[in-house]
Image: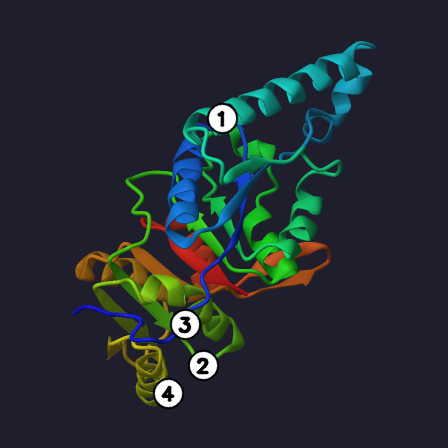
Amino acid sequence: MTNGLKGIAVQAPRSILLHLDSSPRTEARIRLARVLAETFDAEVTGVPCALTALMRYPFALEASPDAICIMKELDKQCRDKALALFADAGGGSPRMHCEAPPDDGPWAFARRALYTDLLVLGQRNEEDPDAADLPPDFISSVLVECGKPALIVPYAGAVEPLGSTVLIAWKETRESARAVTAALPWLSRARAVHAVGYGAAAEPSLRSLQAYLRTQGIQASVRSGGADDSDIGERLLSLAADVGAELLVMGCYGHSRAREWVVGGATRSILESMTLPVLMAH
């Protein structure tokens, strides 16, 4: 099944905000962002962002009078490594730019994200020593705070720049609708688009989605996952593997509770176990 624009203008992202850190997987995100920039005629801004060493080890100040200097040097090493990765993987592309890291780290990144069309973020790998560089809820908090779509890159496996086969996790919610709208540039280029919904009202809502996509020149096959809406995250990843999806599109569900971002079960499951790039929107 081949989709085409058929004369309908689909607004592609023109500004892409790329999260940089010193982890090895950053290189894959940079290369993906560069391909996206070339495909969509966009500009990429890479922003190094991490918790400072002092934030991670506040009690070290009591152990040594030189602790601040040591921690500043650690921060500089991480920042220099991220910038070196950006320069190397960016290949000198004129579309790739870099900004200084924000003063207040991850909390400022969401504010910076207000001024972009698309974010490129990386899945958290709990086994990576560099995982402590960011708060555990970094991705979900950025998505919920800025409201912009994000392409989240898994910490393992190959990454396809666009995804010739796309799977949409559909639910009649604002979050799902925003994710589908953000995904139109990918959907219009995909060879095959699948959509799945779960719950008692899945079938009629999927038909409505199918009709909407048709107005965008996109032919999508739809299927109901059944009335049972439990373990959706695991079932989505299993279906993505079955249909050979290279991109999953879904809403991100979450809210703030006592300064901590709490995400829904399916969102949390996907963020923890994703095996393919995921385009999410809150």
Examine the image and state in which quarter residue 269 appears.
bottom left
- At horizontal 31% and vertical 43% (from top left) the residue drawn is 159
User: Could you say whether the residue bearing mark 1 is in a helix, strand or loop?
Assistant: helix
The spot of residue 195 in percent (x, y) is 29, 73
Q: Is residue 153 visible?
A: no
Question: Mark 4 highlights which residue?
Answer: 201
* CA distance separating discs 2 and 3: 24 Å
* CA distance separating discs 4 and 3: 31 Å
Which of the two marks, 2 or 4, is nearer to us in this view? 2
Which of the two marks, 2 or 3, is nearer to us in this view? 3
Mark 2 touches mark 4? (CB < 8 Å): yes
Question: Mark 2 highlights which residue?
Answer: 172
* CA distance separating discs 1 and 4: 49 Å
User: Could you say whether the residue bearing mark 4 is in a helix, strand or loop?
Assistant: loop
The spot of residue 117 in percent (x, y) is 55, 57
Pointer 4 local density, CA inside 10 Å: few below 14, some 14–19, many at least 20: some
* CA distance separating discs 3 and 1: 33 Å
Pointer 1 local density, CA inside 10 Å: few below 14, some 14–19, many at least 20: some
Q: Is residue 100 left or right of residue 59?
A: left
Amino acid, disc 1: Ala
| Label placed on residue 9 | 3
| Nearest to the observer: residue 161 or residue 234 | 161
